[in-house]
Amino acid sequence: MTPARPAPPDTSRAAAFLQAFEEDRGTPIAFWWVFAGPSNTLTLPEQIAASVGDRIISHAIAPGEWIREQEIGQQFGVSRSPVREAMRLLEREGVVRIHARRGARATFLAQKEIQDLFEVRASLVRLVGRRAAEHRPERLLELLEIGFCTLGETADDPATARRYGETAAQMTLLCAALCGNDRLFPLIASLSMQMLRYTSLGLRSCERRRRSLVLWRGAIDAIRRGDADAAEQFFASRLEENWREIRRLLETEVPA
């Protein structure tokens, strides 16, 4: 009897992200990519979770704010059951916490929790940079250059700081989707959703965005020439410098 072959890794999340990026490059970060499964469709609870998740990372729902389940149910025309299932999905992704008999609340992460997430994400992002340089598909390089143009357009304008942060996150996801390791994208996507509120904080100043732009230029050039060591270091430096700024700001103020 021939042994069953292991199931191939689920690459639909990466494919869905790449399709969305190429069809509408102005689309902001979407929680949909976290939940997309093999059929590229979402169940009703997943649709609700994606909608609420997007509101959280865009600050429409502030850290620490209670999720109004009844209002969400009315918006989707559903009972509380799929809304509560959606909250469980978001709790699994680390962006809400469910409190017994009180409902769900957008997470307000302590500095130690943010640091723990940063350490995990930094390790994976270093690997993404290395694998991208080793694999260096032409499609990735083309998309990174498009993203880099957007970074340049938004680096000096305080009004476009959030757009800069979203574009930088998308570029990291592009590298994860096209680096040749099918397991990396869903991991990076989930961590990016949890961290985006805070990584954007670290890019709030024009000075920080200009420095990030320099590091992105170095990373793209390293990927293009296949220099895995340099690409990994540029990716690491970008995250480490951003974390230092996040930590400085968290010690002096509450994130907006």
Image (tube, rainbow, N blue to C red):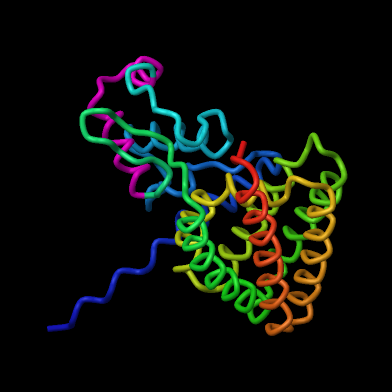
Residue 218 colored in magenta in the image: no
Q: Give the image location of residue 142, x and y in percent.
A: 76, 61
Q: Tally the numbered discs.
A: 0
Q: Give the image location of residue 232, x and y in percent.
A: 66, 77
On the rendered structure, is 34 left or right of 29?
left
Which quadrant is home to the N terminus? bottom left
Q: Residue at x 46, y 54 (%)?
A: 190
Q: Residue at x 27, y 32 (%)?
A: 84
Q: Residue at x 70, y 71 (%)?
A: 237
In the image, farthest residue toward the left: 1
Q: Give the image location of residue 186, x and y in percent.
A: 45, 59
Q: Quadrant of residue 171?
A: bottom right
Does the magenta stretch mainly form a helix, a strand or a loop? helix
Q: Residue at x 40, y 17 (%)?
A: 75
On the rendered structure, is 72 left or right of 138?
left
Q: Quadrant of residue 125?
A: bottom right
In the image, farthest residue toward the front: 252
Residues drawn in magenta: 72-92
Name above or below for residue 26 compared with residue 244: above
Q: Quadrant of residue 243?
A: bottom right
Q: Nearer the viewer, residue 59 or 29?
A: 59
